[in-house]
């Protein structure tokens, strides 16, 4: 790595360019006078006095007095790394403290701001493409539930039977969660530290784990929409158009309309009544084996 690359590295961690140039020259480790440092760094002599004074104050270099001039010598680089690491850590800790304090104040403002209340919320929100906001909005809606969460979807990706803390807490608090899943094996499960394609037995076991969390679960062969109904007031709909659509082509709708939510509640119930519990599905499978 040449000097220019090293200088760019120093700049990336907060050094100014002329500071980096002086530092690289000092890294020779030998005592050097101001004219010698300026000449090798290709900087004006008067421009580096403040930099050398700063380095000495920070303990990066020693000042050596001779009969004719002052000379500067870098200390052990390992010691400098420790000093810089301490400075960066303290600076980051200070910034994080300010960040948390500032956002804490903003959070209170957000909660008190009438513009953020449900009464002033848009009736329909459209969220397109692949971005974190889609996931955050979904989780925000789920956590806003007070009494009831009704969901229709299909299991996809990697599914584990880990306890869902939110579900357990919600149900223990008197809430109701009813989940209707389409019978599909388009997901994977973890077995003995390996991820494998799911079987019908895995589908049943996953549903049973959800039931252990307090959810009411049913399975259906109907091509149900991907939808969540919150407290019969709000509806979250994922419009994929095609089950194999890439994430960046997906669209979510958030509908804040009680009449529409009640209509979707009726639709959910019509599917629910025609669906099977995990045990009923399990018994059906056993009949054919």
Image (tube, rainbow, N blue to C red):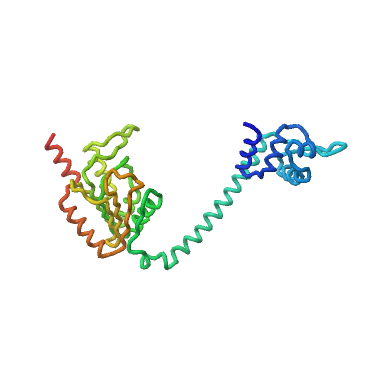
Percent position of residue 25, x then y: 72, 35
**Which quadrant of the structure image shows residue 87?**
top right
Taking 96 as reference, is 152 left or right? left
- Viewer-side residue, 11 vs 205: 11
Percent position of residue 260, x then y: 25, 62
- Give above or below for 31 relative to 109: above
- Give above or below for 212 relative to 141: above
- Viewer-side residue, 123 vs 232: 123
Taking 190 as reference, is 17 left or right? right
What residue lies at 32% left-to-right and 36% top-to-bottom? 190
Report how many numbered discs are placed on residues in the image. 0
What residue lies at 42% left-to-right and 67% top-to-bottom? 115
- Viewer-side residue, 288 vs 216: 288
Seen as rendered, the residue at the extreme right is 67
Percent position of residue 188, x then y: 29, 37
Image quarter (top left, top right, bottom left or bottom right) of the C terminus: top left
Seen as rendered, the residue at the extreme left is 287
What residue lies at 31% left-to-right and 41% top-to-bottom? 157
Percent position of residue 128, x then y: 36, 52
Taking 130 as reference, is 233 left or right? left
**Which quadrant of the structure image shows residue 8?**
top right
Image quarter (top left, top right, bottom left or bottom right) of the N terminus: top right
């Amino acid at each position: 790595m040449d000097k220019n690359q090293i200088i760019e590295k120093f700049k990336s961690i907060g050094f100014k360019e002329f500071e980096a140039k002086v530092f690289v020259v000092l890294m020779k480790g030998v005592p050097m006078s101001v004219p010698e440092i300026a000449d090798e760094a290709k900087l004006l002599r008067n421009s580096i006095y403040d930099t050398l004074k700063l380095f000495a104050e920070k303990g990066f270099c020693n000042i050596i007095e001779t009969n004719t001039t002052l000379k500067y010598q870098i200390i052990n680089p390992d010691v400098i790394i420790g000093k810089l690491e301490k400075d960066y850590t303290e600076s980051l800790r200070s910034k994080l403290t300010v960040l948390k304090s500032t956002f804490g104040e903003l959070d209170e403002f957000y909660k008190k701001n009438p513009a953020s209340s449900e009464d002033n919320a848009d009736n329909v929100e459209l969220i397109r493409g692949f971005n974190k906001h889609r996931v955050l909005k979904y989780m925000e809606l789920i956590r806003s539930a007070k009494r009831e969460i009704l969901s229709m979807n299909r299991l996809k990706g990697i599914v584990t039977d880990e306890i869902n803390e939110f579900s357990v807490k919600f149900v223990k608090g008197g809430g109701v969660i009813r989940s209707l899943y389409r019978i599909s094996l388009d997901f994977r499960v973890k077995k003995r530290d390996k991820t494998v394609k799911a079987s019908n037995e895995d589908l049943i076991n996953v549903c049973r784990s959800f039931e252990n969390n307090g959810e009411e679960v049913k399975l259906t062969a109907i091509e149900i929409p991907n939808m969540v109904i919150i407290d019969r007031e709000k509806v979250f709909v994922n419009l994929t158009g095609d089950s194999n659509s890439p994430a960046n082509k997906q669209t979510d709708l958030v509908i804040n309309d009680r009449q529409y939510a009640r209509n979707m509640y009726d639709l959910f119930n019509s599917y629910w009544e025609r669906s099977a519990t995990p045990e009923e599905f399990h018994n059906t499978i056993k009949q054919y084996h």
